[in-house]
Image: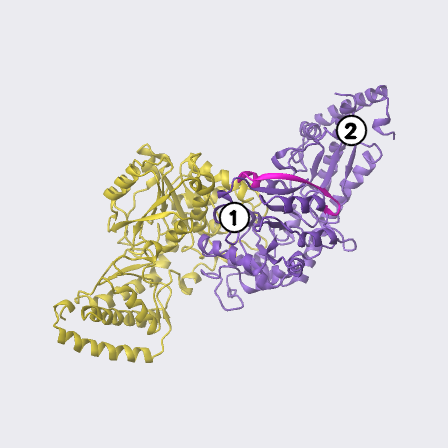
Chain colours: A purple, B yellow
Amino acid sequence: MKKYEEMSREELLELKKELDKEFEDVKALGLSLDMSRGKPSAEQLDISMAMMDVLHGNADLKCETGVDCRNYGVIDGIPEAKRLLGAMSEVDPEEIIIYGNSSLNVMFDSIARSMTHGVMGHTPWCKLDKVKFLCPVPGYDRHFKITEFFGIEMINVPMSPTGPDMDMVERLVAEDDAIKGIWCVPKYSNPQGYTYSQETVERFARLKPAAPDFRIYWDNAYSIHHLYKDKQDFLVEILGECMRAGNPDLVYKFTSTSKVSFPGSGIAAVAASPANLEDFRSYMRIQTIGHDKLNQLRHVRFFKDLQGLHDHMHKHADLIRPKFELVLNTLDTEIGDLGIGTWTRPHGGYFISFDSLDGCAKRIVALAKEAGVVMTEAGATYPYGKDPHDSNIRIAPTYPSLDELGKAVQVFVLCVKKASVEKLLGR
Amino acid sequence: MKKYEEMSREELLELKKELDKEFEDVKALGLSLDMSRGKPSAEQLDISMAMMDVLHGNADLKCETGVDCRNYGVIDGIPEAKRLLGAMSEVDPEEIIIYGNSSLNVMFDSIARSMTHGVMGHTPWCKLDKVKFLCPVPGYDRHFKITEFFGIEMINVPMSPTGPDMDMVERLVAEDDAIKGIWCVPKYSNPQGYTYSQETVERFARLKPAAPDFRIYWDNAYSIHHLYKDKQDFLVEILGECMRAGNPDLVYKFTSTSKVSFPGSGIAAVAASPANLEDFRSYMRIQTIGHDKLNQLRHVRFFKDLQGLHDHMHKHADLIRPKFELVLNTLDTEIGDLGIGTWTRPHGGYFISFDSLDGCAKRIVALAKEAGVVMTEAGATYPYGKDPHDSNIRIAPTYPSLDELGKAVQVFVLCVKKASVEKLLGR
């Protein structure tokens, strides 16, 4: 089919008529579908159900050092949980702290701690006139919400398939000591599914920030979340890279089992240098008597080791791979040649990133909603919800059934076509 | 036996010789006992073991509104958990938010939130020159550590069997708008086991603080933790009392199941006015995607309702009552007539508060340690660890076995005698 931009006004008007009709027909179906949520499906949760049985009423609930996991104690995680999440994070058990059910909460608390107490003895950020964060865009809305909540000024840094624009990152952090951090989802990024290249990670580890309390917030949320056995992205382990570069304190590395076991009932962890971990612990020791050790034990006894985690992730992959492929095939078939959108083809993670013609994303999401399909809000992938091109839309294929997803993505491409024609006709 | 202070110098010297000998004999036993920890014993944890089986691999893990508790969602608690902890807190389900595993963590976060964002739109505390908290003393060390950590100045307020000195509380909060809060353990207080009287609660609800962002931190940690069926303290419900007094926003009411089910693996909650709860939620919505709903469901399915909680607490009481009585009987028998100490006789909670002669507490705790018995650090029950009289010692009878406890308390009374004689002899 002809590219939309090569069509004459008459052709576009004719096309618009067809699409409007099609859109009215779809609306009449009264659909109620959702491609907005980066949530596992019920079938994915089912594969972890045996985890409910590993800590039964007659089980020995002591961890390997003999501590009764039912009682108080052990502030930073039982040894076997440190070993499991250490392996998942590619660090040694002593380089990790185990937290509660949410790595987002740990990131939030890290910012909160930096605001009130500063980073490793440096001035608390709440005493500074200005604090800034770099935000690779498009990115994860919940990251941006945290820095926005604390009044931290966010600076957009463009993403590419190899990671953030490192020339820009290097220049900005070197010249402005108000820049205290950068949000990164380095593997199977949210929303593109990009994985930072070896060069990108090496340049991160060698950053020379003007601010001594600058930290890389390395949210490795999808470290083992591959879609394929034969096509897997590889991410250089950054903590070791920072150590080798003589910058051991430069990075906080977050992970969790939220999309491995049960979202909301998983365990989270931070890997960092000894000095950073002590900074985290100094806060934790006042904040809590300890996290849920029974849930730590439950995870270790269920997954056993890294191989157990990988085996489990293959089951997830088998369930979600067809969903990603359905979306990608539909996009290819329906609008692949029309010049009205581009999209990513991730090898893992939870999202596909779609870019429409400039100025169309809000309209597409609004049209989809009108037709009964909820998409992630346009703009959500940018700080302050402001996509300067109004073009990025995050597609989350995992939660709906294949059947629902098929319907939803058909509605989506129709809305893309309709919004694009409207745009080219000047509305 | 004669009171120590009525003894002649010769009698005291003779007594000292005996006690020194006895102390050396005890030391030779090489004991290793602990009366410091407010932890349930293993036997107490055993009574909750069936909780491990309620969410099995074939269980339906939806809450009553049909939400799959295994997945993301439901920021402030599943309805049945709100109902259960609402009943435990004597408030309606809509007056409560369910949190993670630690009410201490919620208190910490409440202070952190007030520092960075202020209370319900008021100036963030980190922007103020001075923030102060009232601290009924002796009190809970972990409360005081939180306010100390945030650089909040703590003012001691004397406790009595009916609660804090309310004349002092009323006067201070009315005249000083830097006073932003007060730490309270209103029922079976830590460490005395006192319960605030009706008059005290009514005066709290009618406080007229100069600071509009003053809040009562009402840590009702031991609300259903009775030792006896026939001797139970009654605490007036403060949230309703505040509402009736026209001060609905005055109080944050905290609770948790830490010493009901499993410490570290329980669920926590806050009850407060709608405006306060919205203030909490505005923070939570950024901080986390939600707490562990499976653990909420596990608690509800195990305890069912308030009666289930009470039945369960009777089992705890049956296990710890003999321990409290053993300590009290030993104190009565061994030093009841000697005028060298006073102690409380709680009807619930986890502690007995002991007051030695002035200037003896540190020495008693040091002697006990020398003889192989760990006590809570002297001074821990006061802000900054400074007991102005050096007299208060917190006794925690629950964790050791009856046999160990019997030995430990014998060592303790010996140390009290020895330290008291030394004191009266001027060392």
SS at mark 2? helix
Share a chain, discs 2 and 1? yes
Q: Which label lies toward us, 2 or 1?
A: 1
Instruction: Identify the image quadrant of the C terminus of chain A.
Output: top right
- Residue topped by disc 2: A417
Region of the chain picked out in magenta, as a range: A145-164
Q: Residue at x 44, y 44 (%)?
A: B110
SS at mark 1? helix
Give how far across and how far down residue A213 sits, in percent: 56, 50
Is B385 or B27 nearer to us in this picture?
Answer: B385
Q: Which subunit holds the residue at mark 1? A: A
Q: Work out whether mark 2 precedes mark 1 in sequence or the reverse, and give the earlier one.
A: 1
Exactly how many numbered labels are in the figure?
Answer: 2
Q: Tell me the quarter of the picture where residue B218 sits.
A: top left
Are the residues at dot 2 and dot 1 in contact (C-beta closer than 8 Å)?
Answer: no
Q: Residue at x 47, y 41 (%)?
A: B116
Q: Is residue B77 visible?
A: no
Q: Is residue A147 magenta?
A: yes
Residue at the right extreme of this rendering: A1
Give how far across and how far down residue B72 sits, in percent: 58, 44
**Which amino acid, mark 1?**
Ser
Give how far across and how far down residue B296 sits, in percent: 49, 49
How many C-alpha atoms fall within 10 Å of the one at disc 1: few (<14), some, or many (≥20)?
many
Q: Which mark is residue A114?
A: 1
Asked if residue B121 is positioned above or below residue A296 in the image, the reply reads: above
Q: Residue at x 50, y 38 (%)?
A: B282
Asked if residue A73 is positioned above or below residue B303 in the image, the reply reads: below
Give how far across and how far down residue B93 sits, in percent: 43, 40
**Which amino acid, mark 2?**
Lys
> On the rendered structure, is B377 left or right of A52?
left
